[in-house]
Image: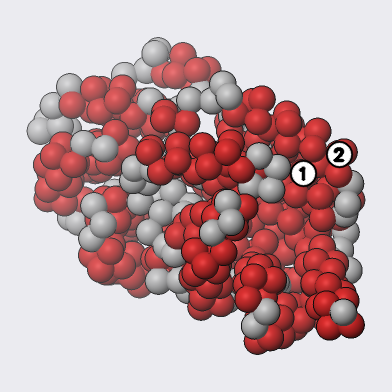
Amino acid sequence: MAYCLAILTHHAGPEADALRARCYMRAGRPHEAVDLLSGIDVTALPHRAASELLVLKFASAIAIGDAEVADTAMLEAKARSYGVGSIELESEFRFYCALFAWTQRRYDDAREELTALIEARSDVPSWLVDTTHTYAFNRSYWVARAYELLGLTAARHGDFASQAALLLRAFEEYDRASCVDVRIEAAMLSNLAVLVRDLQSPELEAFVRERCERVAWNRALDEHRFLVLRALGWCHALSGDHLGGLRHFRRSADVAPSVALRITALLDRAFIAGELNERFFASEELELACRLAADVDFDGAGGNERLVLLDLARALADVDVVQARRMLDRYASIRGSMSALEVYANDRRRRAEECLARADVARAEGQSDRATMLYKEAFEIWSAIGYEWRAAAAALEIHTLTGEPDYLAVAAREAAARPQSWIARRYAKVVHAVHAQTRT
């Protein structure tokens, strides 16, 4: 990106300014894009060039989180973009209108804009279309991004199967586009991978696995690559290929762009090792994770990274309950709000994760009634959204505490569906304990 900006220093004019602004945004420097675009007088520019610069100003204002600047820029861009005769420019503008509405939590407005974007067709006579330069991204690219954002709308309502279907539609449109934006491709793939881990779809898993090999990964995409590798690791472990799971968790640790995410990978490895009765291996991974966590500034971490504290609390509950409680209390003290675009924002999965961590710690502290209540809440959430293996894991905890047979039956179905997995191993242990108790 620095190379592109260096080349543009030798060029002037609105087209160069537009490319420069896009480079700033791609490099994660939206403030510089806003400064650049705010200093340009668009009144004397050709209509098409002025419209693109105003749309980019709107987009960069959204990126810096300045709603007032974004709102003003949106009105300026709207006055020009619809009269340009460019379906590409109109599509980009509509997408950013939807994104702005989403970040403001005006979800119905966002859906309306996205639907209009997808259904739009150019009705401008060809002789009126400005063909003086090719637009940066064609319509298929913006339709792909619209489907991706519609997927987040589905996720917000707990419809993760629909989110997966919409992401597949997004990839279809992306592949039709004449442009390549590996950053967006990687983001869509990581969103899909997070779903694949829990939806038990061999077709989706195969798609993610194949697409992962095709992406031109680079260091700027490490967080997305981490999420994809981690999800594939869980797919391996849940199918009974625990070695493959451990291998993918190691690969995810190697590409983790932050210490917090590396801790997540270590805890994944510790969990699978523990389920396989590899106690020394599990304790080594957990000990390293705890040492690393001591130096992490969780107060300044992103919302998704703060969830690591819940993972630590769960991992420590049966080892050091005092430390587990400390992790849980620390999470509660800095929980705050997530960006509307973060993976677990605005859906019930985050609440289920919180319930499980609190239940594990409460159980370790001897608060069986409270633990049961929290496990049951998590179970209801996982069941409602179709996350069957997670519901089964919670059901086993409930049965262990209460002896209620219905929950054991839920776990039995999932163990039968994954006969070689750690879930089946855990179910077999619980059944063995039940039989042993019956005999005595």
Residue at image mark 1:
270
**Kind of residue at disc 1:** Ala
- Local packing at callout 1 (Cα closer than 10 Å; few below 14, some 14-19, many 20+) is many
Percent coordinates x, y for residue 56 in the rendering: 29, 38
Distance from label 1 to label 2 (Cα)? Answer: 7 Å
Q: Secondary structure at mark 2?
A: helix
* Vertical order, 393 against 95 (above or below): below
**The C terminus appears in which quarter of the rendering?**
bottom right
- Identify which residue is drawn at 46% across, 14% down: 6
Residue 281, label in figure: 2
- Identify which residue is drawn at 69% across, 54% down: 231
Q: Quadrant of residue 280?
A: top right
- Local packing at callout 2 (Cα closer than 10 Å; few below 14, some 14-19, many 20+) is some
Of residue 405 and residue 291, the one placed in the foreground of this image is 405
Of residue 337 and residue 60, the one placed in the foreground of this image is 337
* Vertical order, 275 against 76 (above or below): below
In the rendered structure, are the residues bearing label 1 and label 2 in contact, judged by CB atoms less than 8 Å apart? Answer: yes
**Kind of residue at disc 2:** Phe
In primary-sequence order, the first of circles 1 and 2 is 1
Query: How many badges with numbers are in the image?
Result: 2
Percent coordinates x, y for residue 415 in the rendering: 79, 76
Percent coordinates x, y for residue 160 in the rendering: 52, 70
Q: Is residue 387 visible?
A: yes
